[in-house]
Amino acid sequence: MDPNEIASEERTGLGSIRIADDVVKVIAGLAAMEIKGVAGMSGGFAGGIAELLGRKNLSKGIKVEVGEKEAAIDLSVILDYGVRIPDVAAQIQESVKSAVERMTGLVVVEANVNVQGVAFASELKEEEHRVR
């Protein structure tokens, strides 16, 4: 395992426990996707519109900075049309913080939510057909 990709390492009486950056990213992505109003993670802009990522690419819409005991997480998301953005973003922050802390033992000091687009129901159906 590349030492640059290790998010967290802890020594125990039996040896060491290592958690890779990608593990933290996937935990954060799954926690965000559980929130009602989240259409998906965003992989950036393609052709001037936000790219909606499928469930297999959860970690691409997330950046993590991890210290020995703390983590800062940036999530790029696309929300469903019609939701109240501040409410959904706050729910994402709480869900991500709770899941990452519970599963990794790291303290999440920041969970920044970047809303990069809004998806309409017709766009989501098209995306589901492309993924299958």
Image (spheres, helix red, strand yellow):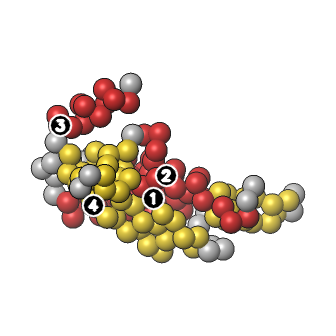
Percent across and percent down for residue 2 are 73, 59
Gap in Å between the C-alphas at discs 3 and 1? Answer: 24 Å
Q: Secondary structure at mark 1?
A: strand
Q: Secondary structure at mark 2?
A: helix
Gap in Å between the C-alphas at discs 1 and 4? Answer: 12 Å
Residue at which label 1 appears? 62
Gap in Å between the C-alphas at discs 2 and 1? Answer: 5 Å
Q: Nearer the viewer, residue 69 or 38?
A: 38
| Discs 2, 1 touching: Cβ within 8 Å | yes
The answer to which quarter of the image holds residue 96 is bottom left
Q: Earlier in the sequence, mark 4 or mark 3?
A: 4
Q: Earlier in the sequence, mark 2 or mark 4?
A: 2
Q: Secondary structure at mark 4?
A: strand
Gap in Å between the C-alphas at discs 4 and 3? Answer: 17 Å
Residue at which label 2 appears? 59
In percent of the image, x 48 and y 63: which residue is there?
A: 63
Q: Secondary structure at mark 3?
A: helix
| Discs 4, 3 touching: Cβ within 8 Å | no
Amino acid found under the numbered disc labelled 4: Val
Residue at which label 4 appears? 115
Res 35 seen here: no
Residue at which label 3 appears? 121
| Discs 3, 2 touching: Cβ within 8 Å | no
In percent of the image, x 24 and y 31: which residue is there?
A: 125
